[in-house]
Image (tube, helix red, strand yellow):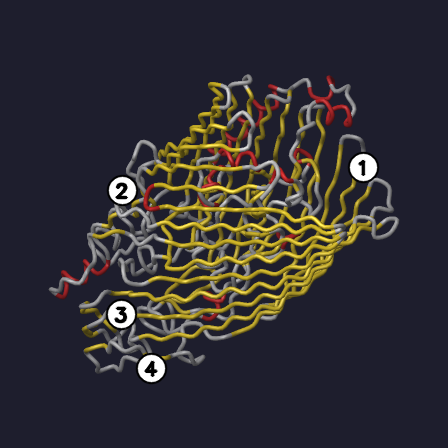
Amino acid sequence: MRDNKTSLITIVTFYLLVNADSCLSYTASESETVGLVYGDEQMVSIATGNYQLLYKAPAVASVITRQQIAESSATNLNELLEMVPGLHVSRDYLSGDAIYSMRGFFRDPDAGVLLLFNGVPLNNLQKGSRFSALQMPLENIDQIEVIRGPGSAVYGADAFVGTINIVTKNITSADDVSAGIRLGSFSNKHLWFQDILKLPGWSLSYMLELQSDKGDDGRVVEADLQSYLDVQALTNASAAPGSISSEYNVLNMLFDVSYQDWKLQQWIWLNTDQGNGHGLPGIDTLDPEGGIDSRVFLSSVEYNNHNFSHDWSLNGRFSYLHNQSRQLQYLLPAGSNAPIGDDGNLFTPGTRSVFFTSGMIDSTDIRENHLNLELTAFYRAFRQHQIRLSSGYQYQTYDANESRNFGPGVLDAGQSVAQSQLTDVSSDSLVFLPSNTRKISHLSVQDEWDFTTDWSLTTGIRYDQYSDFGNTINPRLALVWQTRHDLTTKFLYGRAFRAPTYMELYLQNRPGTDGNPALQPEVIDTLELAFDYRPSSEFRTTLSLFDYRAQDLIFSVDSITAANTKTLENSETQDGYGIEFDFHWRLNDQFKIYSNFAWQFSTLFGTDQQPALAPQRQAFVDLKWSFAPYWQFIPQVHWIDYGPREVGDSREELASQLQLDARLRYRNHYKNWEFSVIARNLLNEDLFEPSLANTSISGGAAIENDIPMPGAAIYLELRIFPATGF
């Protein structure tokens, strides 16, 4: 570990020596610098809650712009986020739940990155991740803001190692009226339409997107857990070799009504017939019969007055989020003969053989409702200070109905054949997750102080009170130094927390792991040193280094009260450090290049054990070549090098993955339509995500050869931009 940190110090020293003339050459004023060098500088609000120049933001932040989205080969949000340094979105979905991995943290599903939709949190109570089956199209997104690092001092829970804010288009001109269609591999279909209606003092914009995909049937799993059970029980029930179920059908609608300082938004998102991926983690059995329907309704009313009084600006938001998901899972297929314990669950104490005529089936209907009220004010009466005050209240409810043909209350200890008919187990004592509520209140204060021409100090602290585990306090400190007219240096410290999820607190009546209502939040303290170097409008680069300690991490440990059962405890500490680097370079009118690289090293405290499954090194290259009038060719290369396997997993480490994507784009002379050919995994490489270990199975995992990713895919896309609207 010491050698690795020495290497980081060497890199920083070299970076500073390259720019050693520092302040001695600084003669231009800040306003001249912005006007001459940063005239097209990106703006970002995610760092402090107030819009500011990206290079001055007191955080390690990235922005994916509207233009980058339009030129990318990505077809949905999860593919697009691979552009962010150090962020990897695993695509081994359980019911469409992507895993956002950053800075050495991997969770299935993720619970360390907060996702916002126009500032409204989308992380759910059940798993802490995004709501189930999230597949988000891109046409209505204006930009995506990302913080790499702690964000709890502004946003509260789950902004643990990162925060992502999706900013939708604010349509204000006829140029933004558009429609389009994309068709391609795996029966992919995508249609969209957006328009605006203007009345005196009012504006109404609306967006409609339809997207569907049948999934790549070439993603074949050769063997799963049921294959292992078939060998033990001399049955032939497994669907393997077989394809992973990855189909989906998405309806995405957004209505935006604005009047003076008021804005009303209604977002409707529906996903039907979503495939169940490769099965429940830890069971890993192909499920071609089940599926999930998921829906989200988000309503928000926002008041934003920048001139509320002489020294005050005021923002108030009330939002209501309703999420419902209905899932049918075949944990084991029809004809399975499985080892079932006395409690009716798989692999639990008192094991005997039980025959599942129709399969081991679980049907759930989960509903969450989130009410959120937040008031934020900026006070500017003090010279060179901007003070942000915020308070809020959230009321969240969770309710689940469940029917199944296994588990407590269904399978008696002496029963050898499971019924085909499902039993309703929705009572709080039998359901896998009982109904509950969570109430959250918070207070925060932040001061942005420009104490000299070249220095600014941002300090802040947030207090959160939770009804189920108590309170937490999270401070931040950011010192930004305009080292010279083309170099900015940032010294950052922040603390963040991840609230225990409902699954971690209250999970019951499931094989393997029980919840623990006594859990406390996970806490991370992070130090960062960042440089932003922009010698010209054609070239800019950033370099950031981070070092953190995460404590009270929630891990499964052997239960002291039940044999062959695990419980969740705040039992681990993780130390990590790393580097993130990117650059934008406009070589000439024909060539532009964007590239980034990230490396991280982390260990569990007191051991040499590295957390498994998170990428250790990542690189991304995006090249834009305007090779003829109205033509562009945009190849994108993404490389990932994974870390070690899980403890006890004797399989060889997963080989590094290299994916080439591309877009060939033609926009006509009048710029009122364009046509593209998009290729994903152009070289048709055999790409994989790591599968979870199961040391009780020969080979070390139920899916021994890892999770296959989609093969080559080709899409044809037409966009129309009528000058006069529809």
Disc 3 residue type (three-letter):
Met
Numbered mark located on residue 451 in the image = 1
For marks 4 and 3, give the CA distance.
15 Å
Judging depth in this view, the residue of 374 and 117 nearest the camera is 117
Disc 3 secondary structure class: strand
Q: Quadrant of residue 510?
A: bottom left
Disc 3 target residue: 360
Callout 1 environment at 10 Å: few (<14), some (14 to 19), or many (20+)? few
Numbered mark located on residue 398 in the image = none
N-term mark: 2 or 1: 1
Q: Name the residue located 42 percent from the left edge and 55 percent from the top edge.
A: 97
Disc 2 target residue: 652
Disc 2 secondary structure class: loop
For marks 1 and 3, give the CA distance.
65 Å
Marks 1/3 in contact by CB < 8 Å: the verdict is: no
Of circles 4 and 1, the one toward us is 4
For marks 2 and 1, give the CA distance.
55 Å
Numbered mark located on residue 409 in the image = 4
Disc 4 residue type (three-letter):
Gly
N-term mark: 4 or 3: 3
Disc 1 residue type (three-letter):
Phe
N-term mark: 4 or 1: 4
N-term mark: 1 or 3: 3
For marks 4 and 1, give the CA distance.
66 Å
Q: Quadrant of residue 644?
A: top left
